[in-house]
Amino acid sequence: MESDQPQQHGLFQSAGRQDVSAWDEPDSNWNRAAAAGSQADPFCCRTEWQLSYHEAMDPHRKLIVREQSGSIAAFAEMNLPESSAGSLSIYSPVESHWFFGSPVLGPAGVDLLVELFDELVPSRDDYDSGFLVSGVEPDGPLFKEIAGKLGSFCNAWKVQEETLCSASLEGGVDGFLSRRSAKHRRSLRKQNNKASKAGVYFERHAPATAADAAAVYARMLAVEESSWKGIGECGMTVGRSRRYYDCMTRRLAESRGGRIMFARHEEKDIGFVFGGLAGSAAGSCYRGQQFSYADDWKNYSIGNLLQLEQIKWLCEEGVDRYDMGPMMDYKVHWTEINTSIMTLMLKRKPAAI
């Protein structure tokens, strides 16, 4: 593959914790590649999402990365049961639980994937090994390029499909609200009046240092502990989720991309909404991550009001889109853009008999 750009290739397969410092910065080649095209979920292609997952969830997986200036193909070797290992090797996206982001980024990303296939699955006799590629829009440009460049020697299976939902912020808050139902707008006005009379107010935070991020995250966890999720021990305060969002909040402070809104009453936090900014060729977007509120405030629609206040802030900053992740019933009222993504399993076609 020829290019007039300087190339920097790397293949990392060392066991144990790996040095990811080359990518673990806001303006890394990985993040530049994520911004180079139009992604269904731009934030989840970035290192704040991908490397936080690696650090918190499974830091001992082997990272498999091939890159050149402006493009990257980033995978991790899956942990397979010993009984099924043998010669079988499956390489998944680094974040391999939700499969929101794409591991193949930039104009040469698919070419780098072809190189990885030739290096790691060189033989047609090894047709059980392969790559999982997530964040692929059906009939989108990535799907078409994969089909064109790998179709002659690979079979592809769809192993997962998801619908992501988003809202345009075109026209600012008024434009956003004009795309909501009249019933939803009336409900928001009533909820806002009720909370305002009760003395609820809102506070914005965009952490810029590790210390800022730690302090804000501690406040978020305290709210979560008082929510129905914290009470039920099923939220971000438990298990590896606690570590995951801690890592993400810290990385977002480095990129100045974190946006956290607190709902407060009498100098006490009673709710929060948290997410991060990303940019791409299609414009800037905010990706929501978590929101929560104290259980004793559940009759004040704090979650809805936090979402609205966050949207006001984003519109002031000129953000183009609010990404809310996978479709859920409550998100229907907040979004009007649905995008399908799928995860493909790519394996070499078996050798002819």
Image (tube, helix red, strand yellow):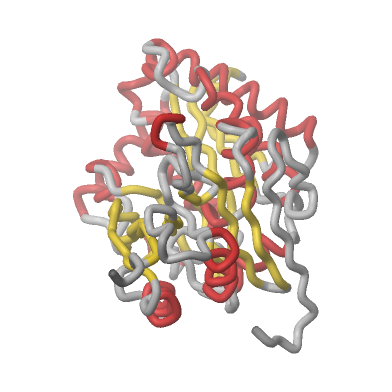
Residue 271, above or below 342: above
Image spot of residue 82 (x, y percent): 46, 30
Foreground residue among 55 and 131: 131
Q: Residue at x 63, y 47 (%)?
A: 63
Q: In the figure, residue 28 lies in which quadrant?
A: bottom right
As drawn, the residue found furthest toward the front would be 353
Residue 267 in view in this figure: yes
Q: Which residue lies at the image location 61% right of the left edge and 31% below the top edge? A: 56
Q: Is residue 206 left or right of residue 94?
A: right
Where is residue 18, by image quadrant? top right
- Residue 204 makes an appearance in the image: no
Q: From the viewer's perspective, is residue 299 above or below residue 145?
A: above
Out of 73 and 321, give the one closest to the viewer.
73
Q: Residue at x 68, y 73 (%)?
A: 70
Nearest to the observer: residue 216 or residue 46: 46
Tell me residue 282's x, y (percent). 51, 74
Residue at the left extreme? 183
Q: Position of residue 261 (x, y in %)?
A: 56, 38
- Quadrant position of the N terminus in the picture: bottom right
